[in-house]
Image: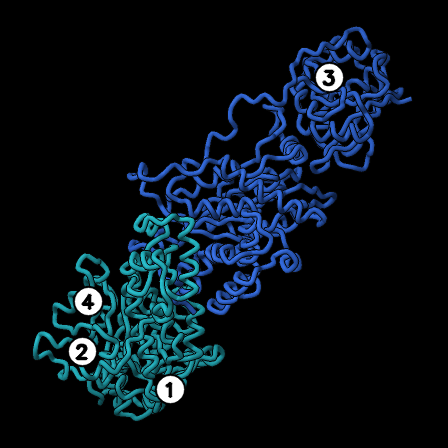
Amino acid sequence: MEYWIWLKQISGIGPVLEKRLLDRFQTPPAVYEACEEELLSVEGIGPTLARVIRQHRSLDQARTLLEETLRQDIKLLSYHDPLYPALAKKSSEAPILLYYKGSIRENSTGVAIVGSRRCTDYGKQAAVEAAYFLAQNDIPVISGMAKGIDGYAHTACLKAGGYTIAFLGNGVDICYPKEHDGLLAGIIENGAVISEYPPGTRPRPEYFPERNELISSWSHKVFVVEAAENGGALITAGFAIAQGKEVRVLPHEINNVTGRGANRLILQGAHIYSHPSQLLPNFDLDHVSITSANSLPAENEDMSNLKRVDKSSEDLRKPDRHLSNTEKKILFSLSFTPKTIEKISADTQIDQLQLIQVLSMMELEGLIRTYPGGRFAGHGGA
Amino acid sequence: MASIVKSFAIWGVDGYLVDVETKTIEGQPLISIVGLGDTAVKEARERVEAALRDGHFRFPEMKVVINLAPSDLKKSGSHFDLPIALGLLMESDQLHVNRWQDFGCVGELSLNARLRSCTGVLPMVIAAKQAGIKNIIVPRENIYEASLVQGMNVVGFDYLREVVQFLEGEKEYNIQQEINFHARAEDPYPADFNEVQGQEAMLEYIVVAAAGGHNLLMIGAPGCGKSMIAKRIPTILPSMTEQEALETTKIYSVAGMLKRTGHLIKERPFRAPHHNASTNALIGGGNNATPGEISLAHNGVLFLDEIAEFSKKTLDALRQPMEDQQVTISRVRYSNTYPASFMLVAAMNPCPCGNYGSDKCRCSDYEVIKYRQRLSGPIMDRMDIQKYVQPVNFINLSEYAFGKSSKELRERVEFARNIQKKRFKKIEGINCNAQMGHALIKEFCELDAEGQRLLQVAHDRFKYSARTYYKYLKVARTFADLDDVASIRKKDVALALMARDLEKEKAGMMVI
């Protein structure tokens, strides 16, 4: 493997040239042994590059790296490895060598869920719902383990027992952002964290677009949840479009700053996301092409069979008994948005002291549930 | 024979008797003070010499040895000036005590023989009483403090000469000072809970916290009224008993914080150290191992605003004192133990940006969890009640009814506390529901059938750990006590289950 590392580490030679070299010489050791004339015969390699390659003919650095890699229980995925997905190889920029922790299974390509680091609850719920759905359909969730949407997508997938892959803009031995250390461990256990950078590489802004390209090239479809106007998610979407992949975008409120980039994608012709089943590979775009304005996707025959998995209201149920007037009033008040006790009391004119008691019982019965910030909501809420 | 004057020293918050022995020996004029005094004690010789000359006394021109017995205990403070001066005068035949057989004295001397006030007078007088000394001489400024101890003969003076004249019987002491402990100029609590409006639900939990001695954590966006509520909590705690007042006053006396008033502290203290406070400032320590904020909050409220901003180490240092209700500060040669029985009230933001739960907040669940982990598990565990404080729409304040007054709430609290007092009468070290351990919870937290069923449902639904289960039981016990019922009802359980917002929220977080 040290020859792979050697080839990858030569500066001035990118993935495209590396692959041409591999095409010409078959294996990295052969590239290593090649003389300058032989190298010159490869298209794109001029005298300067050929000299650079020859001057680099030392395996010391590669061996140190390999040792470090093995010591940290990091594995290597080379371009010739059968586990390297064919889909990912389609990209000309596909790296010839990837470092990873965890396990890469067959059929490791899936659906990317990317979005803002600073997301809204709406975006979070959509990402979580999609990730749950994909996990239940055994489709890997691909993302970048960043804060916000990325993190939620991985987390939800793992919680649903799914397989997920995270691509990092740093070495796989470094956890960035730090608070994701638990998540990182979870992904390694039930998926893989992959990086094209050797262990010990710190995150740098210029690494992230390359990481984004990897996310896109390992995915059949890209789901953009929330993207600010110059966010990384837009870069991923850009790669996906360039690679001819389907990009699904969650529509956002026009006033939402973190959703403007996503809305612009829609303006530019990306498909709107409205149901997780649209992320399935066999979901036929043409099939839903709307013939009449009334046939919304949700009423589509294929989709009616698919139950919507809404995690947020999953544990809520309809009451199986006669509700008191107080409870009806409360449920009515909570049918749209989550509210605090103070607000419910103001709306329903029920005394706060009585209210805490009733709410507590209703929560136990599963009629309502707690929301962040000491709020409550019922079925229709949130 | 050496002259002996009785004085006192401080050990922790307690005083002990010190014999100040003075002996003149033939030899080079020299004064030496032995008995492990600190620098303030050693410097007494300069002050005493100047004061004696200024008071037209003769300073013995011989070798003088002064011993502070017991000689193997460290002593500190400037209050040995007076006994040393008196000892010197007796030894050099300038003072003949005609009035009293036995007396104790403390006081610092100024260079022109005036008596200055000193710290720790209250515990010293208590020590005098315990040692059977009835007569005490203190600087006039300390007379109030010294008189807090019943059955003592306390006299206070301004000048050394007055002390000498009094002891020789030349002059009588005329009691001019009107000592009235009960007069109080201003209301100690101008703040009242009736100013907290539109938050009745929150108030109910504060009453429960106060009634059961439960520690309270308030979570809320900046400016929602957390500090306003905290400042009012002492107003609903039961009034201090004589014993408690004396304990608290002792600590303030030792800390030198009584100088101004000299009155007994009768209001429960409210201490709110800034989050920049060092561990020593909070726990106690420093050069003389002086009491920290937790001891100054003894029998009162310790309010930690922005508790997440305190250093983790400092917070964790609170654990042991909270458990033992006292803190021991150890130094190489000695250790001081201060009482520290306080109700911990803390406030924090729900997330790094403070707006968690609103549309403004963009903190990820991982960040929120990380932020909350600044409070270690054990500290979080000791917070029986964790409630969100919701901002009140202050524009419409007139719509809200005036809240309940502190007096009204305090009556409920005192009522529940009395029940607990009876309940824990025979159990050492337990005064309120919050202090119950597992065994006591099993013994005293009996549920009625409906309550039992409800708690079971909650347990099945939210998969509580045993620890959490007991926590809810304790809080439910206090709810039941407020209504004076023996076994915990369904209602109490329902209310208790709403007492821990953070814990519930954690279950709903999308994190691994």
Tell me whether circle 4 and circle 1 mark residues in contact (CB < 8 Å). no
Q: Is residue B452 left or right of residue B332?
A: left
- What residue does disc 2 label? A299
User: Residue A148: which quarter of the image?
Assistant: bottom left
- Count of residue discs: 4
Q: Do labels 2 and 4 share a chain?
A: yes
Tell me whether circle 3 and circle 1 mark residues in contact (CB < 8 Å). no
Looking at the image, is mark 4 or mark 1 earlier in the sequence?
A: 1
Q: In this view, does B144 lie to the left or right of A98?
A: right
Q: In this view, does B366 lie to the left or right of A113?
A: right
Q: What element carries label 2?
A: helix
- What residue does disc 3 label? B155
Q: The blue chain is which one?
A: B
Q: Are marks 2 and 1 on the same chain?
A: yes
Q: Which chain is cyan?
A: A
Q: Mark 1, residues whose alpha carbon is within 10 Å: few (<14), some, or many (≥20)?
A: some
- What residue does disc 4 label? A251
Q: In this view, does B113 lie above or below A312?
A: above
Image quadrant where one finds the C terminus of chain B: bottom left
Q: Separation of disc 3 and disc 1 at Cα?
A: 90 Å
Q: In this view, does A281 lie above or below B267?
A: below
Q: Which residue is drawn at 77% across and 34% down?
A: B36
Q: Which residue is drawn at 31% across and 56% down?
A: A329
Between B78 and B213, the one lying in front of the other is B213
- What residue does disc 1 label? A105
Q: Separation of disc 4 and disc 1 at Cα?
A: 33 Å
The residue type indicated by label 4 comes to Pro
Q: Separation of disc 4 and disc 3 at Cα?
A: 84 Å
